[in-house]
Amino acid sequence: MLGDMWRGAAIELLQITVLALVQGLTEFLPVSSSGHLLLPSVVFGWPDQGLAFDIAVHVGTLIAVITYLRADVLALCVALFRRLTGGSETTQSRLALQLILATLPAGLMGILLKDLIQGDVRALGIVAVTSIVFALLLWAADARAQRRGDAQGLETLGFAGALFIGCAQALALIPGTSRSGVTLTAARILGLRRESAAKFSFLLSIPIILASGLLLAVDASVDESSFDWGLLAYAAIASALVAFASIHFFMRLLPRVGVLPFVIYRLLFGAALLLWLS
């Protein structure tokens, strides 16, 4: 009996570890975290770890991106506060308002289509197709921007452009699309250089991760006494550490290697899923 308990605990810890690492690694890379998190339950029959676990890994990735971009986040908050209290408009205050505007489409779609997103659309077939289609769109947008020599910074982004990126982000509610990937695609279409596109994507992730975490918290109906706070803290820390490293290396590699390695990976990933499903 005791051996079975220890074996069950070890299996649960392994599952939590894998899922937390996958969440941290894929949340900010253009490869789709939702698509990868769907795999273990479908392929290996792993049970859903529940809303509390989802909240924990969301907290972890949120801490990671805020920590990595802490100087930008602080500057944006200060600039927005000064603007709202009668100060003059600055590049930072305008960017803060653009981020708020860009958050609205995904927020509204998430609320209106929550049941659909959590239901039939969460299928490996959808993940396979969207992984391939949006990989090709990302490659095409990046290649086109490179040919044209597009190298604009965030200071050139207007409110219409921010809204365009925000509408693109709403598509990431479909598993396999990749929030990071589709916002990078939209930003490159607008002519932003790779580093600026990635920074806007990461900054834009902060309100959307926070909002989704709050929605999960509202939906959580499990008695708090049943939570294993130690495991939840472990999941949050693991996802935070991996997410921080993922952001760091992605920002370093993106200007040098571009998006092609991620495009190739997504194409292979989508093709492998289609073969597995056939």
Image: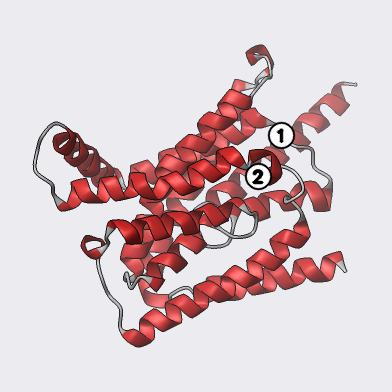
Residue 236 visible in the displayed image: no
Of the pair 88 and 23, the residue shown nearer to us: 88
Q: Is residue 5 left or right of residue 31?
A: right
Q: Quadrant of residue 45?
A: top right
Return the x and y of residue 171 as percentages of the image width and height: 56, 56
Residue 114, placed above or below residue 216: below
Question: Label for residue 19?
Answer: 2
Q: Quadrant of the N terminus?
A: top right
Residue 48, placed above or below residue 229: below
Q: Is residue 196 left or right of residue 11?
A: left
Q: How many neighbours does mark 2 have within 10 angstroms: few (below 14), some (14-19), or many (20 or more)?
A: many
Secondary element at tag 1: loop
Q: CA distance from mark 1 to mark 2?
A: 9 Å
Circles 1 and 2 in contact, beta carbons < 8 Å: yes
- The residue that disc 1 covers is 49
Return the x and y of residue 225 as percentages of the image width and height: 66, 12
Q: How many neighbours does mark 1 have within 10 angstroms: few (below 14), some (14-19), or many (20 or more)?
A: few
Q: Residue furthest bottom?
A: 147
Q: Quadrant of residue 13?
A: top right
Labels 1 and 2: the sequence-earlier one:
2
Q: Residue at x 35, y 57 (%)?
A: 162
Return the x and y of residue 61 as percentages of the image width and height: 48, 42
Q: Residue at x 73, y 51 (%)?
A: 121
What type is the residue that disc 1 sits on?
A: Gln
Q: Residue at x 54, y 48 (%)?
A: 24
Residue 52, placed above or below residue 31: above
